Structure formats: structure tokens, C-alpha cells
Amino acid sequence: MTSTVLTMTTSATGATATEGAIPGDTVTDRLVEANERYASAFTDPGMDARPVLHVAVVACMDARLDLHEALGLELGDCHTIRNAGGVVTDDVIRSLTISQRKLGTRSVVLIHHTGCGLEQITEEFRTDLEMEVGQRPAWAVESFRDVDQDVRQSMRRVRTSPFLLHTDDIRGFVFDVKTGLLREIDPS
């Protein structure tokens, strides 16, 4: 039996994820193989679903944001909720409500970032999708032009939600993808 060692590359290296792949190999196959290696050495950390730091972090899904590393977090420290733009949508409020009411979080940290893709598109994206597939998406794109103002809007949405118990420790930041630094946004 022979084994093939596959290495995953990123777009940052200029290579595509399928370059050098064997026929039938996909990125998902590589992820599953990596999980098998991970699981072979895995030890149950003995944690429950309650975050140790009682904090939920809402952030953009951008692949350049390594939240645990950037914030000095360890496994079990926080709940992490991510979507395009780190936008506080109804589903984010749903997750935060469960996080607070059932799992003990008290603080919310909102993180947007420089160079976000949502700054490059408009709500017209929904119309384009409708023209292409024949059905208009029910969701809003939530595009924006001013990242600071969008963070303020997200903070307001969290602070004014009737479902959240703890709205006194809500802070918003912009992560600079070039420097790795957070810049706090004044909510007013």
C-alpha cells in the first residue's frame, strides 16, 4: 500500500487548492483527511458549551481573520458567530440570544475589517440573482461603504434587541488586515 502526501495551498501563495491534486481529490477530501489525523490524537477536553470567558464574538467570515490567534483565545473561551460582513442579522440575534440566555455569555465583541468584500457590492446583487435564478433572495446583502458606520449600526442592533439580556458590554472594532490591529469604534 502506498500513501500520497497532499499539501494544501492557499490563494495567498498564488496556487489553487486543486493544483497538484490526484484525480478525484477535492479540498473537502483533504479536510476530511486532516480531520482523521486530528481525531487520531484527539483527547476530550472535558468542556461543555458554555464559553469560559462568557463572551460571544461576531465577525466577518473573511479568511484573513484568525480570530482565536488575533484575540489570544483558546478553545472554549468564546462563542464565535461569523457571516459575510460580520453583520448583525436576525440569525445573529438568534445565536446571541441562545448564547446569552442558555449558555451564559454576557459580553459581545463585534469585529468588521478593512477591505471587506461587502464594500464592493451593492443591494443590486439581489436583483442580479433574481434575474439569473428566477427567484429573489429573501435576505438583504447588507453592503456598506463606511465600515465604521456599519460597526455602529451593528452595535445598535445588538443593544436594542429585546431578546438579549446583557447589552451593557457591547464593543465594536475594525480589524486591519494589513497590520493585524483592532481599532475600537465609538458607538456614538
Image: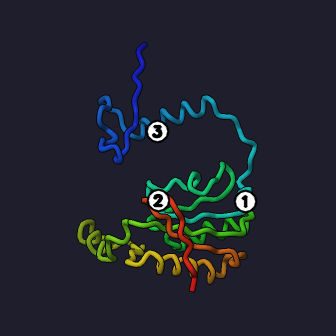
Q: CA distance from mark 3 to mark 2?
A: 29 Å
Which comes sooner in the sequence, label 3 or label 1?
A: 3
Which comes sooner in the sequence, label 2 or label 1?
A: 1
Task: Name the foreground residue: 186 vs 55.
Answer: 186
User: Which residue carries the number 3 mark?
Assistant: 31
User: Which residue carries the number 2 mark?
Assistant: 179
User: Which residue carries the number 1 mark?
Assistant: 53
Q: Are marks 2 and 1 in contact (CB under 8 Å)?
A: no
Amino acid at circle 2: Thr
Residue at left offset 61%, top offset 68%: 109
Residue at left offset 57%, top offset 82%: 187
Residue at left offset 69%, top offset 35%: 43
- Percent from the top left, x then y, of residue 68? 59, 53
Quarter occupied by residue 120 = bottom left
Q: Is residue 102 above or below residue 43?
A: below
Which comes sooner in the sequence, label 3 or label 2?
A: 3
Q: Which mark is residue 171?
A: none
Residue at left offset 48%, top offset 36%: 32
